[in-house]
Amino acid sequence: ILVVLMDLTDESSSSSATNLTEDSVSEVIASSSDQEGLRRRNVGEDSKKVDQDTSAEELKPSSPHPEGKLKGVTTDGKTFFLPKTKHPLNITPPSQWSFFDWCKNLSILHVFWLFIGMPKWFFVVNFIFWRLAYNLGIGVVLYKQSHTQFLTKTFGQMSDFRPLFARVLKIGMGPDYKFEDFPDEFNAWLGFRHFVDVILANDLVSYFVFCLAFWEMPTEFSFWIFLSYAVGVLLCIFTLWSKTDAYRVVKDFAWYWGDFFFLVDQNLTFDRVFSISPHPMYTLGYTFFYGMSLMTQSYPVLYVSLFGHFCQLAFLSWVENPHIEKTYPDMVEDPDSEKNKILYNTQTGYFRKDLIVFKNMDLFRSSDLFVVVILLYSTILSLTNQPASFYVAQAVLWRCLLNLALGWVLHKQSTERWWTNTFTNHGYNNQFAFENWKRIYNLALVMTNWTFLCCALKYADIEFTSTALVKVTMGGVLMALNIWSSVSVFEVLGDFGWFYGDFFIAEVASTLYYSGIYRFINNPDSTVGFAGYYGIALMANSWEMFILAMFSQLINFLFVRYVETPHMRKLYGNQMRSKDGAHEAIEGILRQTVESNPKLKKFQKSASEFSNELNLEAKKLMEKAKKSLVAGDQRFPC
């Protein structure tokens, strides 16, 4: 089990980095076969460049007609068929182990530290060392590989060691692999895999050993202890499922960051676990950290786990995401040039450098200066000794102004273009009307969040205890989730969607895309967009703030239900989906699981028949009740 778990920490690029789009590698391979110039990804200034009139040289693999194999494409246009590689979750006999396999599997010796009485701080340092070796060490190597093809070039220059590399790399490979038949890009990647396996195995085992060092046998078995262990085990099982399901989607190529070395001809896939959460290997794949924190009942385990997860997300943000954006530019919808001309024209456009919360702040603009002045006024007022009800009323009024009053304006604008007509009737144009809407909306948005924060400061009752520290930590995590959600929403919507441009700008075509965070959630600003409010309530240790957060989310729900959704249905029609992506993905996974298991399929059929019979009996009973009421019978027909 431990050997299997060692490989489960192996992280892949996100599903976005799994494959190439139809307009990328397929065109490379097609152009190479037609002896035309190659279209390839940018690999940095130091990378080897290919003239457009140079045809692709296809390397001859060991198998002349491979069936069902992926075709790889190097940075200089060479193509080859990928041989079969070792499954990272399979256990092989020691006779087939290479030097690196021994290093990986001997990571189990970390358990030895438990039996020689090492201090607890040693286990913390041991795990942090391997975690940094993963996220910092591998991160630096991949960063350099992405920008300069560092590993590939180094591998190609070490000609004296090529016989040794050939002997090491062929261990565990099948008959379809011969070292000399494959390009340096593939062989460098194959060697990189061995180092990755060693680091990730030690990272995972050192984490579990660290958890065991801080675990203590419960002195009593209460309901809370039972619940902690039950949830912890479920989270670990969920991690195991998410990892194995992710490997089913990404395979070895993306599991070991293959697109940092070469590309493959494969369609982009977003199914199963990759349809539930963005970057599931770095989000859902780390739920076992929190499961272990629950089972050990240890604050140090929780904080070290948070640190480890933060390092993983930093690795994603600073290494993987930039590489994905550079390698797969076609993954993003092509910008509509006509739309951009309408929206961003310097003379007649609707957007320039507008104030978005505090972004693009210009104190020489009267509207921006007014936002600063009213914020200062509100801040100074919060420092005075006003009754708590004053701060609650202030937060409630701004929330009602944002979602109810401005919601009414948007409703009237949607049905009869009331806002725009009010300005045009006084001689102004559509751009001027929308400009004033943006200023009022941004002021209301800023003040709604600011007054909520001021109210929380009034109600804050922070104690300097370990429990209070956990609440502050969890509150900070929820606030970070809220900030990430808001940034992700803006990345998808842009200026146009952020300011509800489709209510005001009729010149833009009505096209709806579900990309980015919207691929998983229909209305992220109404769900995870309020995580920060509950985080603030948790940090303030106040039930009043929790109720105020619930009230704020309820008002926002009414706005989405009665203003935003009817307008979108009118504008986009059948383009709207009834369920969010995560919901559909979970239903699909459950459906596949039931269909693949005869026992579950039989149980589902029996349950469906029972449900149908129950509904039929209920209908018959209701019909009898209606007839009795019509006949004037006071008795219920049981």
Image (cartoon, grey):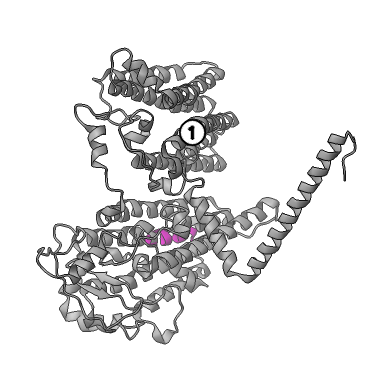
Q: Nearer the viewer, residue 545 or 34?
A: 34
Assign the magenta stretch its main secondary structure.
Answer: helix
Q: What element does badge 1 sit on?
A: helix
The picture places residue 121, in percent across and down from the top left corner, at 46, 57
Q: Which of 384 and 602 is in front in this view?
A: 602
Q: Tell me the residue at 14%/57% (across/down).
A: 45
Q: Tell me the residue at 34%/55% (across/down).
A: 315
Q: Is residue 399 left or right of residue 15?
A: right
The picture places residue 249, in percent across and down from the top left corner, at 42, 65
Q: Residues within 10 Å of mark 1 (few under 14, many from 20)?
A: some
Give the residue type that dot 1 points to.
Pro
Q: Which of 525 and 37 is in front in this view?
A: 37
Within the magenta stretch, is there residue 430? Answer: no
Q: Which of 215 and 612 is in front in this view?
A: 612
- Quadrant of residue 162 within the rendered picture: bottom left
Within the magenta stretch, is there residue 125? Answer: yes
Q: Tell me the residue at 28%/13% (across/down).
A: 427
302 shown above or below 123: above
The picture places residue 272, in percent across and down from the top left corner, at 47, 59
**What range is drawn magenta here?**
119-130
Q: In this view, does 189 lie to the left or right of 614?
A: left
Q: Tell me the residue at 44%/43% (across/down).
A: 481
- Quadrant of residue 149 within the rendered picture: bottom left
Q: Name the residue under label 1.
A: 566
Is residue 331 something one can see in this rendering? yes
The picture places residue 115, in percent across and down from the top left corner, at 52, 70
